Amino acid sequence: MAITTYTVKRGDSLWKIAQTYPSSITGNNINAKINTLVSLNGIKNRNLIYVGQVLKLSGSASGSSSSSGTSAPATQPVVN
């Protein structure tokens, strides 16, 4: 069963998440999967995600205008 959300942990990156859950994220290759994560979650800087941030792995990006705040950012960003 494919998971639909993922909570970012220390050391994570969009690339690592896309590699770990390939069947849950739409896309033909890693770059396409990363683009899906960026789009679904309204991420403005693909190199900056936050510990504790809840990312959608699948679903619709229709609510992405407000989804940049899907979770209150932790005090320490995960910089890739």
Image: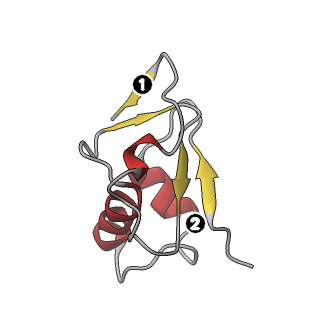
The C terminus lies in quadrant: top left
Q: Amino acid at mark 2?
A: Tyr
> In the displayed structure, does residue 72 sit left or right of residue 37?
right
Q: Nearer the viewer, residue 30 or 66?
A: 66
Relative to 72, say whether 42 is above or below.
below
Provide residue 69's location: percent of width, then percent of height.
44, 41
User: Around disc 2, counting alpha carbons within 10 Å, would you say few (fewer than 14), some (14 to 19), or many (20 or more)?
Assistant: some
Give the CA separation, mark 2 to mark 1: 21 Å
Read off the residue under disc 2: 21
First of labels 2, 1 by sequence position: 2
Determine which of the numbered discs, if any, sits on residue 77 in the image: 1
User: Around disc 1, counting alpha carbons within 10 Å, would you say few (fewer than 14), some (14 to 19), or many (20 or more)?
Assistant: some
> In the displayed structure, does residue 45 sit left or right of residue 58?
left
Q: Residue at x 49, y 62 (%)?
A: 19
Residue extending furthest bottom?
Answer: 28
Provide residue 15's location: percent of width, then percent of height.
40, 54
Provide residue 14's location: percent of width, then percent of height.
41, 51
The N terminus lies in quadrant: bottom right
